[in-house]
Amino acid sequence: MIALSLSLTSLPFSYALSSTSCKSRASPPRISLITSRRRQDRRRSIEAMSRDIRSSDLPQVMMELEDESDFEKLLSADNRISITGFGSLLSERSARSTFPDLENFRIAKLQGFRRVFAHSAPIFFERGIANPETKEISSLSVEPCEGESLVVTVFEIKSSEIPAFIRRELEFRFLAVVPETLEGKPYTNSAVLCGRYSDEEFFQIRCKGNKEIYFQHYGRFNIEKIWRDDILPCRLYLRHCVLAAKNLGDEAYNNFLDHTFLGDRKTTIREYLSSTGSGIMEEEPPETLKSRYGG
C-alpha cells in the first residue's frame, strides 16, 4: 500500500481485522471529529478484534477519513473526489443511479484488500430482500489482507455529494487508498474506500452512544450486531454484484469470484455459488427491483 501525503489519521497496524443501491437513510448523525480518549478506545477495540493478525501481514500505511474536512483534502483541482466501487458500484448503472453526475467511470486494481460478506445491511430489510431465517442478510465490505488484489471501479463525484455519501455509507470506516491501473501504475489522486468498521465504534462514534440513534439505523430491524461472521450474502445483492463484475470483463469477473469471501474468510464466492449458494444466479429480482439489482 502506498503512503499518502495527507494530514489524516494514520491507523495502527492492528487495523486489519480478523473477521472482517444506495439509499439515503433517515437523518443519521453527521460524522464528527474523534476525541483523543475516543481515539484510544477505538484503537483498543481494533486491537482486540485483530489478535490473530500479525503486523507483518498488514499494509504499511492506512489513512482514515474521520470527517468531511478529511474528504476535502482528497479533492482534485476541479473540485471532485474519487470513489472506489467493489460491490454494487462495480455496476455503472448502479453508480449512476446514486451519482447521476459521476465522471470517468473506469476499472482499476486495489492491492492489499479482500472482499468479505460479513455485515448486516438495513437496506435489504427495507427493500424486503433480506432473509433473517436463513441468515442471508449480508452486504459487502473490504478489509486489509496482505497478498490479495481486487479489481474495482473508480469514478469521480462532485464535492457537494460528499455529505450524502457519508450518510449513506455510515456503517463503514472511510479510508483513503491509492488504486492502480490494470497495468499496475498508481493513480495520481487518492480515492475513498468503504472498509470494515466495528460495532463498538459504530455505536460510540456514529451513534454517539445513543441507543435511539442506533435503533433508527439498525435496531428497528432487530439487528443487534452489525458485523458478523456467521451470516450469508443477501441473494439478490450477491447476484447483482456477480453480474456487475461479469459485465466488466473476465478479469473483473474471475477476481470477484475468487477474491470475495464469506464470513469464514475461507469460502470464496465461486465455491459458494457451486455449493450452498447454487441457484442464486438463476433467481430474478422483483419487477420493482430489476433495474436496481440487474447487474
Image (spheres, rainbow, N blue to C red):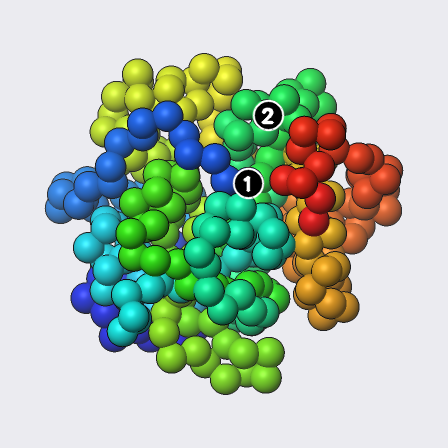
| Mark 1 residue element | loop
Residue at x-position 31% and y-position 27%? 27
**Placement of the N terminus among the 4 image quadrants:** bottom left
Give the crowd class for mark 2: few <14, some 14-19, many >=20 residues within 10 Å: few
Residue underneath mark 2: 127
Task: Please state which amino acid type lies under the numbered disc 1.
Answer: Ser
Q: Quadrant of residue 82?
A: bottom left
Residue at x-position 42% and y-position 63%? 156
- Give the image location of residue 43, x and y in percent: 28, 48
Foreground: 40 or 140?
Answer: 140
* CB contact under 8 Å: marks 2 and 1: yes
For the residues marked 2 and 1, what is the alpha-carbon distance in whole angstroms? 10 Å
Disc tally is 2
- Give the image location of residue 98, x and y in percent: 49, 46
Residue at x-position 30% and y-position 45%? 163
- Residue farthest to the front? 101
Residue at x-position 50% and y-position 84%? 185
- Give the image location of residue 24, x and y in percent: 42, 34
Q: Does 100 sit above or below residue 177?
A: above
Residue underneath mark 1: 21
| Residue 203 horizontal side relative to residue 266, left or right | left
Q: Does 86 sit above or below residue 151?
A: above
